Image (cartoon, rainbow, N blue to C red):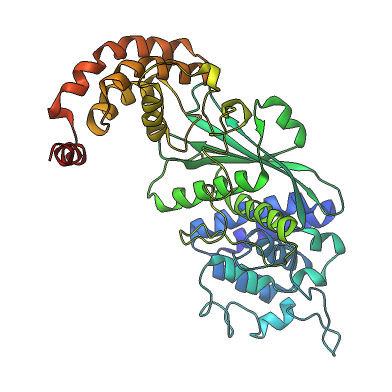
Amino acid sequence: MSSTAFDTAITQARDLLRWRSPLRTELWAARLTAGLEGSGQVEEFLRRAAEDGGMEARLALAALAAVNRPTDAPARGDEGEGATSPGGEAEGSVSSAAEGEGSVDGAGGAEGASGVGELFAVAGRGVAGTLAGWVRRMGRVRCEGGWYGKADPYGEQVLAVLSFRYDNGKEPHILVVGIDQPSGGLAVDALVEEAKFLDELDLRPTPPESVAARMLDAFALTDRVMGAQVADTLPGVRPFAITRARTALEGAHLRDTGSAAGPQHDVSGSRTGLSAETAGITETAAPAETTGSAGVAGEPAPEQMPEGPGAREAFEVLMAFVGERTLWWSPARVSQFLTRWLPREAILSEAAIEAMPDVVRAWTMRQGGHSAVLRQIDHDAPRLPALMADESLASLNKRLALAAREG
């Protein structure tokens, strides 16, 4: 890598040593990660930092390891961090790494690493123990709450929020991840703010492990979509966000079981442990305003459900279409449901077809009763019986199912 880029990082690290802020340093390391990955200079930077050996270089290695923690690494710092060898030198320090032990060149380094997180972990192993005590607080946070809700009136984007505080009680902060629903649930933006920023958001409290699982699923999906349209600021927060979300999941596991071995959630696509579904989140555990007394996430209370023949059947079909994304309900989506999805996929009784417009209106009122959505229902609902009767609109699966019924 260019000397200018490395020297800039060292200069920034020197300022951070004066600030003595774990949060500020972790956020800087996340941005540095994005720059190194984007330019393909991860290994070169780690090599130069190991060769440099100064306090600034060691801080960079420690911070990069903290925000790029591999899936199977402990959440609260390296075990034995800061331990000294018989000769008095900290094990895993930059000087020993430069000689090959724990470096990206030595045994167990790049050849044995399965990803960038492992590279950073190996290069930064034990380095925090050679620096001031505040450095070892990086990554040592506790999750204090979770929130989830719409980012816009129609829920086309939703916000997942987790709040954290370091284990010494300082530097409270919140992580906000924007998730785009029409694209399938991609993580499209993320930011870290002071806790008071939450006061400006109209979100509902949600179990932190549920929010964290949704965040990790969204990042995993974004990683699998080539050319996904995301905010320019997302890459610089992504490593920090993923590590914080994993911490929230692991913290929940520790509270529930008392076990030190927490669930793992690999955003590379191979996932174990909690997922959004098993964590109890349906389009995110649907916050309180979308959970009815009947106990189904997103279901209107009984007094809000239309009565009469076919209403329950119509509602069950509507819920099959809505799926997990219960907060997303826009004019375009309701039109898709009434004019395209139902004729193509659904097999309904005459009573259910007749009840469907009232059921959809009841669901819309539960989602805020936006006038544009109600107008769309009034526009499309009269066409529903004719569309359902048009066999040319049916999918192959629907035709096979109908044929099996008749046979």
Whether 406 is drawn above or below 38: the answer is above
Q: Viewer-proximal residue, 57 or 106?
A: 106
Q: Viewer-proximal residue, 303 or 189?
A: 303
Residue occupying the point 67% across, 86% down? 99
Choose top left, top right, bottom left or bottom right for residue 76: bottom right
Residue occupying the point 73% across, 80% down? 95
Whether 174 is drawn above or below 391: the answer is below
> What quarter of the picture does the N terminus occupy?
bottom right
Task: Tell whether 23 sits left or right of 191.
Answer: right
Task: Tell whether 262 sits left or right of 317.
Answer: right
Across and down, in percent, residue 351 comes to 30, 19
* Residue sitting at the far bottom: 86
Across and down, in percent, residue 322 comes to 42, 32
Whether 10 is drawn above or below 281: the answer is below
Across and down, in percent, residue 235 comes to 54, 48
Choose top left, top right, bottom left or bottom right for residue 42: bottom right
Task: Tell whether 379 sits left or right of 237.
Answer: left
Q: Viewer-proximal residue, 35 or 175?
A: 175
> What quarter of the picture does the C terminus occupy?
top left
Task: Say if residue 48 shows up in the picture.
Answer: no
Q: Viewer-proximal residue, 325 or 46?
A: 325
Task: Say if residue 222 shows up in the picture.
Answer: yes
Task: Tell whether 233 sits left or right of 227.
Answer: right
Across and down, in percent, residue 247 comes to 68, 55
